[in-house]
Each structure stands twice: as structure tokens, then as C-alpha cells.
Amino acid sequence: MTSDTISLNGNEPIAEIDGSTGSTDTTYDMSGARNINSNLTVDFGFVPLHSIGNQIFVDANNNGKMDLGESAIPGVKVILHYVDTTGGMSVCVTIDSVITDSDGKYVFDSLIAGQYLVEIPASNFAPGQPLENYISSTGGGDNTSTGPNEVPGNPIDADTPADSVDHGVYVPSGSFAGGIISDTLHLGEDEPTGEPFDTTALDANSNLHIDFGFMEIFSLGNMVWADRNNDGLYDPSREQVISGVVMELHKVIGYA
């Protein structure tokens, strides 16, 4: 980092302000240089940098956390948004996007303090994409529509230490329609600490708790018909389908 070119030629600025005290006393320069021939305006400011991450995983039992034996999901696109609150309203500005690695992990680094939001866009659920046939974990066990991890407008606080816990909420409409978003993150205020060390981001200014769990979905079907000759086979030339039949699905919790 360098300054602009400085010309010391007798036209130096005078009565500079001491940035540490706000004083305009021309004697504060401890170098011994007299202020009249000094340029005491060459200051350098620095801001701390922050990071956001962590992992996308398969929540096979839909309990809202990554258990031993549950796998990570690589190749998922993750988008970071800056939440601009100037002007009295919140506006999301897209900052960057990354793809999860072979361990399902992602990280956004070199971020300034402020409010952010992480999105798993709907494009990940398209045919041939890594989240095809998956839905967001709800943490509700057999309940795949609601649960403690799937509360619209009130997702889990992403600034609270909760490693390997799903932080995503499905968004049915609006700016993030069909995607999954985290709660708002407040970098520079209350990052969690003590996360497992990540070589790409220093823990002190990182929020490495933003995990997203997904569960695979399946289907059962197919047809009811009048089997006239009781041969167990559907003959479309002689037998008709039966509509209006009520079908019930039962889950077997355990068996001997």
C-alpha cells in the first residue's frame, strides 16, 4: 500500500489535526520536525475483514443437523448478498457466488463489517443439478413441510453458535422464489467464536456456522384397474382403470 506522490517544497499544509486527539497544536509532532515544513496529513486507514461459510449436507433423517454418516453435497451454487439498510429500508445487493467443494463447504472472505444474507438459489434444484429431488431440511422428522428449522420470517439466528445445524428457510415467492435463504448475519457485531479452524478464514472475524441441510424426496404410485380375468396384469384392450379410489400411505416405523 502506498500514498500518492508527496511534494515537500515549502507549500506543505499547516495546522494539521492530530487524528488521535483532534488537536491542531503545531507542536504535537514528536519527530522533532517543525510543523511549518511538515506534511502531517499522510494517514493510512485500515478495516478488519470478515468471512462467512460453511457446509451443505444431506439431512437424511430430517432432524435439522448433520449426523455421523450423513454426507456433504458438492457442486452447489451459493450466493452472498449485502443487506443495505441505508435510506430506511433493506435492499439486498448481490456480492459474490461460489460453488461448494468436495466436502460440501463454501466460504466468502475479505468482507467488511455489515449485514449479509446467504442464498441457495432455485437453480440448484433444476434437473441435472446437485439438489435435484431434494428439499430444504425442516428439522421436523416425518414432517417435511414445517418444523423448527423451517419457520418463514423467523429462521434460526445465524449469529448463534450452532455448528452443523441447518440455517435455511424455503422461500416460495418474491426475490428469492424457489430458493433457500439464511437469517441476516451481522458481521462486526456478534460473530460466533470457537468454530473448527478453517484455513481459508481466521476464526476471530468469521461466521462459520451457516450450514444448510437438505433431504431427498421420493414417490410411490401408480394405478388401480378392474382385473376382469384376475391374472394380475393390466390389459388395456379389455380392462378399465378405476378412478376415485381413496389411497392411504403408511410409514413402517419398525418391525420384528
Image: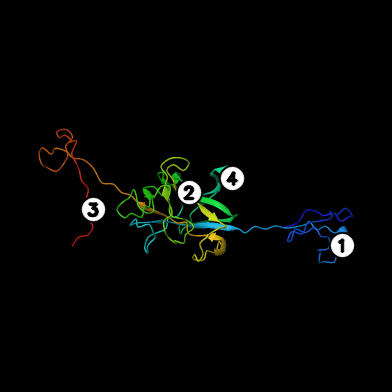
**Occupied quadrant, residue 23:** bottom right
How packed mark 3 is, by other alpha carbons closer than 10 Å (few <14, some 14-19, many 20 or more), is few
Label 3 or label 4, whichever lies nearer to me, is 4
Q: In which quadrant will I find the N terminus? A: bottom right
Colouring: rainbow
Give the mark nearer the N terminus: 1 vs 4: 1
How packed mark 2 is, by other alpha carbons closer than 10 Å (few <14, some 14-19, many 20 or more), is many
Q: Secondary structure at mark 3?
A: loop
Label 3 or label 1, whichever lies nearer to me, is 1
Give the image location of residue 25, x and y in percent.
Answer: 81, 60
Three-letter code for the amino acid on which mark 2 is drawn:
Glu
Which residue carries the number 1 mark? 34
Residue at 28% x, 46% y: name it. Answer: 219
Three-letter code for the amino acid on which mark 3 is drawn:
Lys
Q: Secondary structure at mark 2?
A: strand
Which residue carries the number 4 mark? 86
Give the image location of residue 36, x and y in percent.
Answer: 87, 58
**Occupied quadrant, residue 58:** bottom left
Give the mark nearer the N terminus: 2 vs 4: 4
Q: CA distance from mark 1 to mark 4?
A: 43 Å
Check contact, mark 3 vs mark 1: CB within 8 A. no
Which residue carries the number 3 mark? 251
Which residue carries the number 2 mark? 119
Q: Secondary structure at mark 4?
A: helix
Out of 48 and 15, give the one closest to the viewer: 15
Out of 172 and 58, give the one closest to the viewer: 172
Out of 205 and 225, give the one closest to the viewer: 205
